[in-house]
Image (spheres, grey):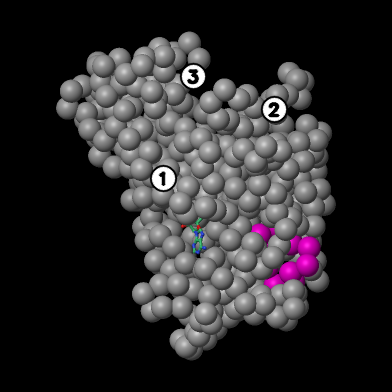
Amino acid sequence: MTLEITNPVKKYDVIVVGGGPAGVAAAVASARLGADTLIIESATALGGMATVGMVSRLTTLSDGNKILYHSLTTEIMDRYMKEAGVEPDFKGRIPLITEDLKVVLDDIVSEAGARILFQSTVCAVEKDGENISCVIVANKAGLTPYKAHVYVDATGDGDVAYFAGVPYEKGDEEGDLQPASLCFALSNVHSENKKGSLNGGKDTVWSEIGRDPKYPLVRNHFVPVHVGNGTIFANAGHLDGVDSTDPESVSDAYIKGRKIAKEYLEAVKEYIPEVFGQDAIVVATAPMLGVRESRRMEAEYQLTVRDYIERKSFDDEVCRNHNWLDCHTKKGKVSPYKLDPDQKYKDGDSHGIPWRCLVPKKVDNLILSGRCIWNDRGVFSSTRVMPNCFSTGEAAGIAAALAVKKSCGVHALDAKEILSHIKK
Ligand SMILES: Cc1cc2nc3c(=O)[nH]c(=O)nc-3n(C[C@H](O)[C@H](O)[C@H](O)COP(=O)(O)OP(=O)(O)OC[C@H]3O[C@@H](n4cnc5c(N)ncnc54)[C@H](O)[C@@H]3O)c2cc1C
């Protein structure tokens, strides 16, 4: 069967695919440098896991001694915190009131001059040699080709790079990926999660609940964030064996994720009744599955755990990361990424993330950003957090706009010039 695409081609300077932290920053940075920019998003809001996925907390912007992220990441978060009236918690982590953040992201992207296209999914690319000649967008208008000088892949899963034939790695040697989680919100909660007192973990009430045969789906993973008015958002429960690039696997995960949320509710009502009274309810489950890990796309440089341990700096680094190695595992498996005490980060420790991790080897009009940049699996478990995604997105957007200005491919760009646009 040959499919004929009859919708006329739409043209932009820069097309950003995916509107999560990386895509938002890419679109803002690109548009502010004067490029005619489009951001294409499958969901109905910007923010990706930060909003639609209901991951309710941005990892700290600090290395414990000083703020690491000065540029767009800080600008966006400052504006959001002012709008939502929230402050970082005792560890510098920023609670995310999703509806406030959605509006701030809509505004900041629109004010920069980028066009937003919601409920639209890039489902294929056409190529001209190694380069992308257009992306094919599926939405209510049918299939439409969108053409740009440069494309930014901010899909988390590296969809655009994958469709363009960029090689990738996924999971460990057995193909196991970090479990997914379907985040959810509980309301009618009678207390805050003061200093993490309700958090899961070993030797907490969660280990006891995990052993209770009434709650087979509950694990000792429970990270609740109080978002006001007796409501908490919970990043809780593990969905093993989910492959976010396999639609059937994702569909099964939503079905099971909703059951997990209900089971957590019953468990907290029984075990922590002083906080979760009989009137507590699951008020929402996230419309976007929480995917920790999928494709890591090959690029000019692969960041490694060795780089992490050595606190490596790079001439072309776009940001620095302080987060710990946080590899969630399926039941019965333990993380292979255990560091010696002197290898673990203390306050003030960090490593760089080079521009080259964003540049796929052969394709000259595509830039990676966010979760799909070229890391080994170990360091990926650390760099996947949102501040790094915002920052790599910003660098990708700057680079894309510069490539438009200079009418060149991304490999010809001077990293120093890209970095000169990132406020330190
Ligand atoms: C359960 C969980 C808990 C986490 N906890 C934290 C935490 O506490 N703090 C922290 O900082 N980080 C946390 N993270 C990590 C962080 O949320 C993600 O790694 C980060 O959001 C990735 O950003 P991104 O922009 O690369 O991708 P995403 O946030 O995944 O956004 C990608 C966007 O692209 C869109 N998209 C995908 N494919 C297509 C396509 N083909 N066409 C059009 N649009 C497409 C999606 O709809 C989505 O909006 C957590 C992650 C998970 C899963």
In the rendered image, residue 363 lying in the magenta stretch gets the answer: yes
Distance of label 3 from label 2 (alpha carbons) = 18 Å
Q: Earlier in the sequence, mark 3 or mark 1?
A: 3
Give the answer, above or below, for where 334 lies relative to 122.
above
Left or right, residue 258 beside residue 289? left
Amino acid type of the residue tagged 3 in the rendering = Gly
- Give the labeled residue for mark 3: 201
Give the answer, above or below, for where 361 lies relative to 189.
below
- Give the labeled residue for mark 1: 252
Disc 3 vs disc 2: which is toward the camera? 2
Secondary structure under badge 2? loop
Kindly indicate whether the residue at mark 1 contacts the one at mark 3 (C-beta within 8 angstroms).
Answer: no
Left or right, residue 51 beside residue 392? left
- Give the labeled residue for mark 2: 336
Give the answer, above or below, for where 378 lies relative to 410.
above
Secondary structure under badge 3? loop
- Identify the magenta region: 358-368
